[in-house]
Image: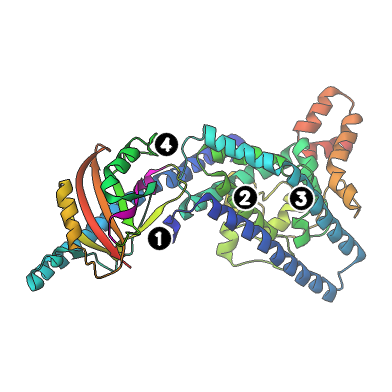
Amino acid sequence: MNLFNSILTSIVIVVIFWACAFFQTSIAHAIQHKEVGASLELSKKANAEKVKVHKTALDNAELVNESITKIINFSGIKQRIYLEDTPQLWQRFNSDTKIHKLLKQQPKQIFVTYSALSKDFKQADVAIGYNVIELSKFDSHHTIEMHRLKRLLAKGKYSDSALTDAWKSIDYNKAIDYVLEVHDLSNGTDIESTQLFVAYK
Amino acid sequence: MEFLSQILTPDDVWGLEAWIDDWFFVIAIALFLIECVRYVIKKKFTKDFFGDSVANFVTLGLFILIVATVGATYAGVFIFTYEQFSLVQLPINGWTILCCIILADLAYYWEHRFLHMNGFGWATHTVHHSSPHFNISVAYRHGPMDWFFPLFFHLPLALIGFHPFVIFLAEIVVQVFQTLLHTETVKKLPRPIEAIFNTPSHHRVHHATNKQYLDKNYAGIFIIWDKMFGTFAEEKEPVNYGIYPKLNSVNPIKVFFSGYVKLCQRLWNAPSWGYRWNLLVKSPTWAWQQENK
């Protein structure tokens, strides 16, 4: 191969491997959605079985298939607040231009975790953010281990009061690690549906 | 394969790079000592071998001094380019690191080929080739400007979105891989490995002065680059190591600056400006041929 063709071939190789590195996020995202979708489908079936047996409010909580150990990392803002101040934290997140500038594409989901809940359940460390695979860079991130999640609310559109009521399904006899809200977005901004999970220690 | 998708922070990558850098040197020294024992047994451990090996490590020390001076600037250029001009910013995870290693290896191939194809680049790279021996210590035989040229060949990786620390890690992996190739102890590896990877056999050819081996096997990790671009040669006959003209010195200072001293002498004694220009841009073989006409 002469020098010109060698350089040309090298450029093609660079484009191929750069594309692999670049589109891995989309591929991973697609796989992740498929797996989460599958896990929720499985949990739905599991829930149906449980409802038949127990018929209690708690039984509406669905167990996410424990064999799936998918990890989701998200990054955004985090603050220790009174839970009643959550709307203000959302406001801060929505107006945080720094994080929104780092989005590589229209975000598909927003993750919210409530961790380190105070004894009176009035305060928590609240983190709101996007999946890191949708961000070009980030300083720190929070990890969600899907297999640890117990579902409290199925995917759907809920009012704030319905979301608050769902917290009553939490088994407060167990030590809570965090409560997770997953908001699916349409057009990258509007919340289309929400799911609620809890992870016990 | 999930661990390859696990997001890493730049600090994780930096830590991994420092760990490889430090511990691999310890491993390389251990391997060199084993080689020395082998040479002793074969009665090939000569005074010249010892002097040459000492010179190799002294050039490494001089090189580290230079890198310590310019290293921050070197890293700064990458970070500035990445933060201000990068096309995208790729996520930092195992897949990205793997892609970066492959591309850094390709960049290394072209950098290495460039160093062999012009007088200015060869003046620093000739130091590495000037040893008449071939062992692990030769891998550490550096020239004064060896830090300079990689900048231009690896900076495009920052432009297309690889984080500078990922690029530095990839550069280290390519270097570390090559260090192990500087040995006569390993003859030939299994055929599939010889077909895809650079091996001690392929790299012996690269260090040869045998006519049919000149300017061949520039690869770092993957020999497939040479096979694709027509610069590959198979090791068939015994290799004679070194350069033309021979250096014949184990004085580390003389070794370290030999390339640029020789280039300056040639430029000073050149018959014309055109000849001087050719000394800088044409291959060292051209200069050697002119002097032996």
Most distant residue in the top direction: B273
For label 4, count other residues whose C-alpha is less than 10 Å away and answer few (under 14), some (14-19) or many (20+). Answer: few
- Residue type at the position of mark 2: Glu
- Residue type at the position of mark 4: Lys
The magenta span reads: A120-135
Left-right relation of B79 to B56 = left
Which residue in the protein does label 1 denote?
B2
What is the secondary structure assignment of the residue under circle 2? helix
Label 3 to label 4: alpha-carbon separation: 39 Å
Give me the residue at 19% from left, 53% from top: A164
- Please give the chain letter of the residue carrying mark 1: B
- Does the magenta-highlighted stretch encompass residue A122? yes
**Whether residue B253 can be seen here:** yes
Which residue in the protein does label 4 denote?
A98
Left-right relation of B110 to A72 = right
Which residue in the protein does label 2 denote?
B171
Q: Report x, y in % for residue B209.
A: 79, 51
